[in-house]
Amino acid sequence: MKNTRKCIVFLLVLSMLTTIVPTAKAQAAAKPKTTSHAYYMIDAGSGKKILSSNANKRIYPASTVKLLTALTVLEYSGTDEEIKYTKKIRRMVPSDASALNLKTGRTYTVEQYLHMLLIVSDAGSAVALAQGTAGSQKDFVVWMNEKAKALGMMHSHFDNPIGLDKGSGYYGTYTTAADFIKVSKAAMENPVIKRIVAKHKYRVQPVGVKKSFVIESTNAFYSDYKKMVKNKKYKIIGSKTGTTRAAGHCLVATAVDKKGNTVICAFYGKGDHKQLYKDIRKLLDYAFATY
């Protein structure tokens, strides 16, 4: 009887220990200090929050909004569809937006525009996709806001497909980190977007034209950051940058470790470009230390 009681006590203690250990591991790592307006970090598989700061504060997403632009396009258009880059479209690209200066009269597929949109953040591609898909930017942003609501984004609004904000006279684009992480997760669950944002380079060949050109991301995750992450415990499998004066330096990043644990972080920084990547590294290091 005594042996039976001892066995029961042992099993109860063992059960408590196996329950407590993961929690203790998560608490062991100190919460990183960052220079940010806000951020939100989740486990991609479960959607469970790992860490956040100022999650419900109104912020400006800058070009990370192009993830929502891409999601909206893919709801209404196939990747093989073709859109001509007209003079009208070129005139609609704001002068203060990042653009590739594409030649007018050339035709590109939706797939090619999406690569230019997400790899080098081309504003011309955002306008072309909006015009070509919805017929006008005005109608396209209606679709964007409908998509945002469908994702459960109750504290966000968008008035252009580029990510311009109040600094450029667009006062209807704003979000929160808690809202935008939903776009980030949906984007990485979309096979087309997931494939594109993992790329560093892409060769663009306009429809019916022999001459092509290469676009290359300036994203530090595909250059400097690979040197920064020396432990190789995890790797970046997708990201989208964004910068405006009002937004600061923004980054949505997805990383995976050797066990397959995947983390998504939507970060809106107050510091400079270098500080952005330092802060992201701190957060990802923290996240993977909790598994």
Image (cartoon, rainbow, N blue to C red):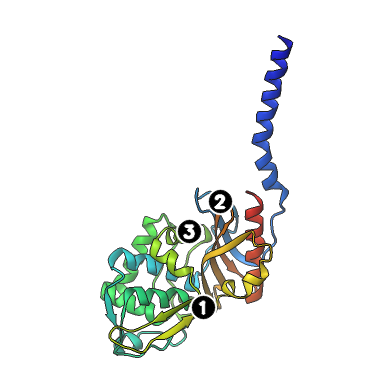
- The Cα atoms of the two marked residues, 3 and 2, are separated by 12 Å
- The Cα atoms of the two marked residues, 3 and 1, are separated by 26 Å
Q: Residue at x 40, y 61 (%)?
A: 191
Between discs 2 and 1, the one toward the N terminus? 2
- Residue furthest to the top in view is 1
Q: Quadrant of residue 134?
A: bottom left
Q: Residue at x 58, y 51 (%)?
A: 259
Q: Which mark is residue 179?
A: 3
Q: Which residue is mark 1?
A: 217
Q: Is residue 80 left or right of residue 167?
A: left
Q: Which mark is residue 49?
A: 2
Provide the secondary structure element on which disc 1 rests.
Answer: loop
Q: Amino acid at mark 1?
A: Ser
Q: Is residue 242 left or right of residue 101?
A: right
Q: How many marks?
A: 3
Q: Amino acid at mark 2?
A: Lys
Q: Judge depth for marks 2 and 1 and give the one in front.
A: 1
- The Cα atoms of the two marked residues, 2 and 1, are separated by 29 Å
Q: Is residue 162 left or right of residue 52?
A: left
Residue 229 visible here: yes
- Vertical side of 94 occupied by 285: above or below: above
Q: Residue at x 39, y 81 (%)?
A: 204
Nearer to the camera, 43 or 246: 43
Q: Amino acid at mark 3?
A: Asp
Provide the secondary structure element on which disc 2 rests.
Answer: strand
Q: Judge depth for marks 3 and 1 and give the one in front.
A: 1
Q: Position of residue 211 (x, y in %)?
A: 36, 89
Disc 2 to disc 1: CB gap under 8 Å: no
Badge 2 crowding class, 10 Å Cα cut-off, few under 14, some 14 to 19, many 20 or more, is: some
Residue 137 visible here: no
Q: Position of residue 26 (x, y in %)?
A: 67, 47
Disc 3 to disc 2: CB gap under 8 Å: no
